[in-house]
Amino acid sequence: MLNCPPNRKAPQKDCSKNLKTCFSRNSSDIGHTTVTQHRIDTADHPPIKQHPRRLPFAKQEEVGTLLREMQENDIIEPSSSPWASPIVLVRKKDGSTRFCVDYRKLNDVTKKESYPLPRIDDTLIPFPVINGSRL
């Protein structure tokens, strides 16, 4: 939540009401966009298919649960792509598991593009409700 100075609390509440659909409240409502489609340019490099890493037996059920939840929430979908990267399970501070994918070999063959990013303080200037606040 934004930590705003007292004189900015009311505008901040109005802003958060107008933009409430832009923020996720939990892991099942992150949504997706149909505005654009992303392509990863690997030029003519043949597909890289890595074998899955072995998981401890105790983690296999947890992985199955995470995959089902992500599929039910339209975060992932079944695929028959020739490209495959291994999953990595990372323990979070609270003891839960973060599901990650090791895309390093894909990154190695991906065409690098450079897009200059604006400074964050320049980006916030048009939003006086947020400017001067901290996250």
Image (cartoon, helix red, strand yellow):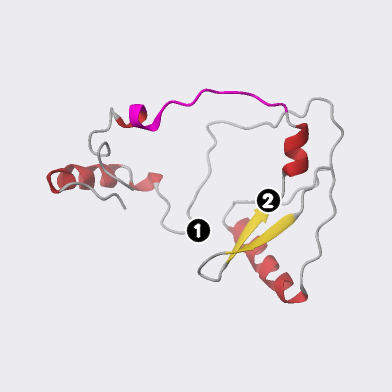
In reply to whether residue 8 is colored magenta, the answer given is no
Tag 2: amino acid: Glu
Look at the numbered disc 1 and give the secondary structure of its residue: loop
Most common SS among magenta residues: loop
Q: Residue at x 14, y 49 (%)?
A: 6
- Residue that appears at 12% across and 44% down: 7
Q: Quadrant of residue 63?
A: bottom right
- Can you identify the residue that label 2 sits on? 77
Identify the secondary structure beneath mark 2.
loop
Q: Position of residue 27 (x, y in %)?
A: 50, 58
CA distance separating discs 2 and 1: 16 Å
| Magenta region | 111-122
Mark 1 crowd level (few <14, some 14–19, many ≥20, 10 Å Cα): few
Q: Is residue 117 left or right of residue 1?
A: right
Labelled disc at residue 27: 1
Q: Compare residues 86 and 34 and report the one nearer the observer.
A: 86
Image location of residue 45, percent across then percent down: 84, 30
